[in-house]
Amino acid sequence: MVSWFVITIWFEYNNKLHMQHYSSFTHNTCESATFRIVEDFQTKNSNKKIKAAKCNDPVTWFKKYRLNKWDQVKDKE
């Protein structure tokens, strides 16, 4: 059975840490989805260095990232 996963990748670019989310519908396990997305990201973005990758189910991802607004940049300058 194929499940839906949301993979979050943290990568370094120009000495700054960035976060990007990917959804995967085509893999059976979270590990295989994460491996494939990380592999594709590295081949397409050779100038960006991956620091971490995490796989979540959609409900957990929504609670962690959307409700807490982790994607929004909060500058206080």
Image: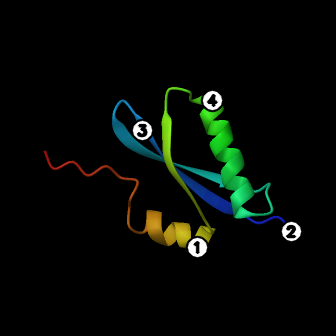
Residue underneath mark 3: 12
Residue underneath mark 4: 44
Task: Please report the residue visible at 61 percent of the width from the left and 35 percent of the height from the top.
Answer: 42
Q: Position of residue 14 (x, y in %)?
A: 36, 29
- Using residue 9 as the reference point, say whether residue 69 is left or right of it: left
- Give above or below for 43 relative to 67: above
Q: Are marks 3 and 1 in contact (CB under 8 Å)?
A: no
Q: Position of residue 61 (x, y in %)?
A: 54, 66
Q: Secondary structure at mark 1?
A: helix
Q: Dot 2, how many residues are within 10 Å of its Cα: few (below 14), some (14-19), or many (20+)?
A: few
Q: Position of residue 55 (x, y in %)?
A: 60, 61
Q: Secondary structure at mark 4?
A: helix
Distance between the Cα atoms at labels 4 and 1? 29 Å
Distance between the Cα atoms at labels 1 and 2? 18 Å
Distance between the Cα atoms at labels 3 and 4? 14 Å
Residue underneath mark 2: 1
Quadrant placement of the N terminus: bottom right
